[in-house]
Image: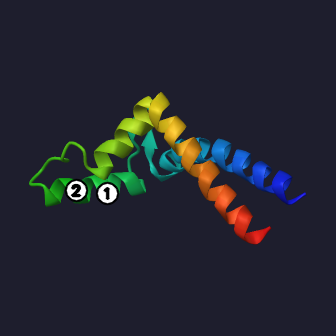
């Protein structure tokens, strides 16, 4: 039963991680049509722009969040998140089971 439980945890983590990232980004305000007014993301964008003299730096966390919110995750990033989620869930299950 232990190996089956470990494998199930790894599969669940591998599926959940790539689904959770876009959902969380959307919840904080990184949407498919841009950053939602009045959201956490809008506050972060404002702070980043102030810190950078009026613009958001390319490659910053705000820019990456906006990109993922608008375009979604690339195939490579989805695969990496799936692998990381599976590894993390499998490791936790191995410790707990």
Q: Is residue 69 visible?
A: yes
- Foreground: 23 or 39? 23
| Residue 48, label in figure | 2
Q: Residues within 10 Å of mark 2 (few under 14, many from 20)?
A: some
Decide: is 15 above or below 13: above
Which residue appears at 49% of the width and 29% of the height? 75
Residue 17 locus on image (x, y percent): 59, 47
Q: What is the quadrant of residue 94 in the picture?
A: bottom right
Q: Residue furthest left?
A: 53
Under circle 2, the secondary element is helix
Q: Mark 1: which secondary structure?
A: helix
Q: Quadrant of the C terminus?
A: bottom right
Neighbourhood count class around disc 1 (C-alpha, 10 Å): few under 14, some 14–19, many 20 upward: some
Can residue 23 be seen at all in this image of the molecule?
A: no
Extreme residue in the bottom direction: 96
Residue drawn at the location 15% of the way across and 47% of the way down? 55
Tell me, yes or no, whether the two marked residues, 1 and 2, touch with CB atoms within 8 Å. Answer: yes
Q: Residue furthest front?
A: 3
Q: x, y (%) of residue 81? A: 53, 44
Along the line of sight, the residue nearer the viewer: 6 or 71:
6
Q: Residue at x 72, y 45 (%)?
A: 11
* Residue 57 image offset from top left, x and y in percent: 18, 47
Residue where numbered disc 1 is placed: 44
């Amino acid at each position: 039963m232990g190996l089956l439980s470990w494998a199930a945890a790894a599969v669940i983590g591998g599926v959940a991680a790539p689904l959770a990232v876009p959902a969380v980004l959307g919840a904080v305000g990184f949407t498919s049509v841009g950053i939602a007014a009045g959201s956490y993301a809008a506050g972060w964008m404002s702070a980043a722009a102030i810190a950078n003299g009026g613009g958001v730096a390319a490659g910053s966390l705000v820019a990456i969040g906006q990109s993922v919110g608008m375009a979604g995750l690339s195939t490579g990033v989805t695969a990496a998140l799936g692998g990381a989620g599976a590894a993390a869930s499998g490791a936790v299950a191995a410790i707990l089971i």
